[in-house]
Amino acid sequence: MEPELRLSLKLQLSPQLIELLKLLQLPRLELEQLIRTELEQNPLLEEVETDEDEPEPEPAEDTESGDEFEWAEYLQDDLESGYKPDRRRTEDFTQQIPAVPNRLRDHLMTQVHLKSESSEQTLIGEYIVDSLDEDGYLRSLTLEEIAGVLGVELEKVESALALVQSLDPPGVGARDLKECLLIQLRSGGKHDGIEMKIVEDHLNDLKNKRYQAIMRSLKISDKTLEKAVSVISSLQPRPGSGIWGPEVRYVAPDVLIERAEEEFRVFLNETSIPHLRISRSYKDVLSDLKGRSKQEKDFVRKRLASARFLINGLDERRRTIMKVMNFIAENQRDFLERGVTFLRPMTLRTVADALGIHESTVSRVIRGKYVQTPQGVYNLKYFFSAAVKSDHPEDVSARSVRARIAELISNEDKKKTLSDKKIAEILKREGYEVARRTVGKYREELKILPSKMRREP
């Protein structure tokens, strides 16, 4: 074989950019913890206790010839102001909502990063994990809605879901009880066992203890059925519980949206983020470079670079989050004024294209963060949902249709409850093209009983 030269382009992230992206996706409480850790470990980074302005120090000159490190690069005036957090709003939140325990989420996220085959599959897998409920189920979104939100092909979402469903604990990522049990049976090597057939075709019979019907249909003995039922009973119907929960964690909003006269203003919640600056103690080292060892100078160089990166990274994080949140506030003005039924469909690609940034950047901005609005506290992911066909001038969000279904049912006559078909007809008159089966699916996702079970005598 002869050697051959090939020219190819590859996108490779620098270590600095990777760290910046990690900084971007941190929620406020985790960011505060990271900063506190850096303050403890880096003597050249200090917290400003007051907001009083202090005189700028005079940069020392490096009189040692041949020094490879350019001190002037790290002694720019713009660093002296450090990072000053936005404290225009005090922490007074009337609504704090519980979130899914972080332990399960972190456990799943680690596995997604280890097992995914591409960065795109990682992004989709992370979105699916963030969409799981406290039981570990994927109930709030369909695969079609996820594909619409992320702007990817349905096949890629299906592949990412298969990845999530292969993770530990077995059963996570299931969309219903049957799928949850089947995943656990397959992971336990019961691919062709009688247990699979019972769960697949006779789960309702099993729930209602119609054992004779199961034995007749599958032509098995009572002992065989007893063993199969014992195996099925040992499975976990709520894979998100157990050692992973149900710990309740209260969240504080990362962003606030408030009404100011005729406009909505966005604030980054940084009430507990320290005011940072480069420590003045570096002057002592720089004043006498000749008397310092290479090890000492290397120590100062690395710590100064780390402090500078954190300060610049916090500035970039704030600019990016504010850019995304201002767009969301403008795009969802009707929701902010009138409520959930006026939520507009929005995807990561929509925001990314409008702001000239990458979709993965938008995904990192919204990941694990909450916003306090005039309508309540919401996970930022809540604002991203696919569109539903309608006769309205603007597209309608699937979430707004769910909210409308919940509203119709809450206001129904309890003696003449609305069937899924009747709700679909009402929605059609209001301009929403929603099938009866879709109404039923949305109703189940809202954990609302069928009309017959809601009816009062």
Image (cartoon, rainbow, N blue to C red):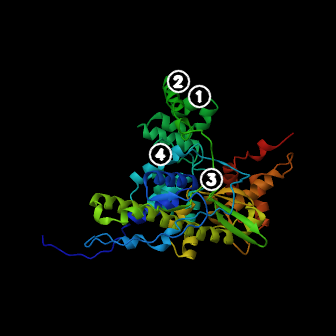
Callout 3 touching callout 4 (CB < 8 Å):
no
Secondary structure of the residue carrying numbered label 1: helix
Residue 55 occupies quadrant: bottom right
Q: Are marks 4 and 1 in contact (CB under 8 Å)?
A: no
Amino acid bearing label 2: Asp
* Distance Cα–Cα, label 1 vs label 3: 33 Å
Q: Position of residue 124 (x, y in %)?
A: 49, 59
- Give the residue type that dot 1 points to: Tyr
Q: Is residue 213 left or right of residue 313?
A: right
Q: Percent position (x, y) of residue 199?
A: 54, 38
Mark 2 or mark 3, earlier in chain: 3
Task: Please give the residue where the numbered disc 4 appears in the rendered image.
Answer: 107
The span from disc 3 to disc 4 (Cα, nearest Å) is 21 Å
In the image, residue 453 sits, relative to residue 359, either above or below, namely above
Q: Which residue is mark 3?
A: 140
Question: Tags 1 and 3 in contact by the CB under 8 Å rule?
Answer: no
Q: Which residue lies under the disc numbered 2? A: 222
Q: Nearer the viewer, residue 225 or 439?
A: 439
